[in-house]
Image: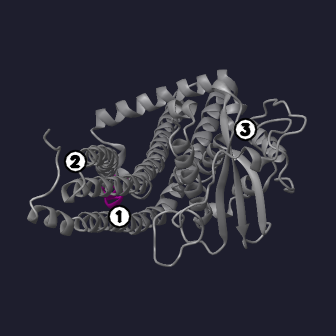
Amino acid sequence: MHPTFGAAGPLGGAEDAFGEQVPLADEPPPYHSVVLQSTVEPASTSGRDTGSGSYGVPANSEFEIRVADPVRQGEGVAAYVSYKVLTRTSAPGYREAAEVIRRFRDFVWLQKKLRREHPGVIVPALPEKNVVEKYKMTGEFIESRRAALTIFVNRVAAHPILKRSPDLQLFLEASETEFGIEVSRSGMEDPAVVQGAAKKTLSGAVSFLKELSHTASNLYHKRTDDEEEEAEYLKIRVYVYELERHLGEAQRQAGRLVRHQAELGEAVKEFGAAMGTLGRYEDAGLVGDSFGQLGERAQAVSALCGQTSESLATSFEAPLKEFVRTVAAVKKVMARRSAALAAYQQARADVDARRTRLAKLRGTPGIREERVAEAERDLSAAQQGAEAAKAAYEAIVQQMGPELDRFQRERAREMGYVLRDFAVVQARLSGDTARLWASLVPGLAAAAAGGGHGGATAS
C-alpha cells in the first residue's frame, strides 16, 4: 500500500530515488531562481487539446500534466537535470493539484514498473538516453527531452488502463522523500533483486538450457512457435517490423531536411551580407539601393529559414522520432508475447516428459513406491506450472488485441496531424519567401529600365 502523499518536499531528501544518500544543502535556493530556461510550451505540448486536432499531448478530460522548469543539479559526470511535474486532475482519489520534482530516471522507473505490472499493454515510449548530449547539457537537448517527457506522462495518464495505476499516482503526487522510499521498497520486491545475483545466474542458465532444448525440438519436428499464433496477429507483427524500418528512414531524412533548411538560412544570410557590402560600394542611385534592398530581403529570408528549421525540428522530426520509439515499444510487447508462448510450450513439453517418466516407473517391476510418488509430485508441479504459463500467455493475448487496435488508430490519426503541420509550415515558408522577393521586383525593374546610375567614378 502506498503512503498518503503529502506536499512536495525539498529537492534531494535524505535518499534519492534509488535509496542512495544525498547530502542536503543548508538553505537551497528557490527552485525558480535556478531554472535553466523558460518552458512556455507550444499548444501541441502544453495541455488539453484545442479541438482542431494536433500531435503531442492527447486530449484528456481528467488530467492536465506539465513537465516544466528544468534545473541542472550537480557537476561533472554526476550532473543531471530535474524537472517540475505539475498536475491538475479530476480523477477519483487524486488531489486536484500537485507539484513534485522528478528527474529522468524517475520517469524510467515509472515506465519499467508499468511494463512489469501490465505485460500486454503498450507502455508509451521515453526519449532515448543520450549519454553524449547529457554531458553537454545543451539548451536544445534539455528542451527536447522536457517536451518528450511531457508527452510520455500525458500518454500514460490518457491510457484507459495505465491511468488507474497506483504507480502513476505515486509518481505524480508523492514528495521526493516519499517517492524515494517507495521506489526503494519496490526495488526490493523486484524478483530480479530478491533472488540475488547467484540465483539469477543459475535461473538464467536453466532457462537458457530449456530454451535450447525447446529450439532443438522445434527443429527436429520441423515446427515453429508461431504455428500456435493467430494468422492475423502474425500479419500485424510483420507490418510492425516493416513499419519500424520505414519510419526510421523517414526520421533520418527528416533530420537531413531540418539541417538543410538551417544551412540554407545561413547561406542566404551570407549572400545578403555580400549584397549589402556591394551596395555600399556602389554610388548612390537605383543600382546601389537595389543591392542594399536585396541584402535586406536576403536577411529576412534567412530568418524565415531559421524559424522554419526550428519549427520542423519540433513539429516534424521530433514526432517521427517518437513514432519510431512507439513502434519499438510495440515490439517489446510482442517479444513478451513470444516469450510467454515459448514458456508455455516448454512447460507442456516438461509435462509430457514427466508423464512419460512416470509411466515408465509404474511399468518397472519392483520399483519403490517412493520413486513413483516423487514422480507423481513432479508431474503435478509441472502441470501447475503449465497452467500458470498458459494463463500468463492468454492474458497477454487478450490484452494485446485492443492495444494493437488502439495503436493503429492513434498512429494513423497523429501521423495525419504531423503531415498536415509539415505541409502548413512549407506553405507558409513558400508564401512568405515569395512575398519578400516579389517586393523587390518593382525597384529592380526600375533600375534595369533606367540603365542604373552607379559604380565607381573614373578619375
Q: Amino acid at mark 2?
A: Glu
Q: Secondary structure at mark 1?
A: helix
Mark 2 highlights which residue? 282
Mark 2 and mark 1 residues within 8 Å of each other at the beta carbon: no
> Taking the image as drawn, is residue 119 in sight?
no
Q: Secondary structure at mark 3?
A: helix
Going from N to C along the chain, the mark reached first, 2 or 3, is 3
* Residue depth check, mark 2 versus mark 3: number of the one nearer the observer: 2
> How many discs appear?
3
Which residue type does callout 3 highlight?
A: Gly
- Bounds of the magenta segment: 229-237
Report the mark closest to the observer, 2 or 1.
Answer: 2
Q: Position of residue 267 (x, y in %)?
A: 28, 44
Q: Position of residue 322 (x, y in %)?
A: 45, 52
Three-letter amino acid code at disc 1?
Val
Taking the spot 60% from the left edge, 61% from the top edge, the residue there is: 154
Q: Which of 132 and 324 lies nearest the eye of the viewer?
A: 132
Q: Which residue is mark 1?
A: 425
Circle 2 residues within 10 Å: few <14, some 14–19, many ≥20 = some
Q: Are marks 3 and 1 in contact (CB under 8 Å)?
A: no
Outermost residue on the bottom side: it is 51
Q: CA distance from mark 2 to mark 3?
A: 75 Å
Q: Where, by quadrant of the figure, is residue 7 drawn?
A: bottom right
Q: In x, y percent, where is residue 247?
A: 32, 51
* Label 2 secondary element: loop
For the residues marked 2 and 1, what is the alpha-carbon distance in whole angstroms?
37 Å
Residue 179 visible in rendering:
yes
Neighbourhood count class around disc 3 (C-alpha, 10 Å): few under 14, some 14–19, many 20 upward:
some
Residue designated by label 3: 187
Is residue 248 left or right of 141 when viewed as pictured?
A: left
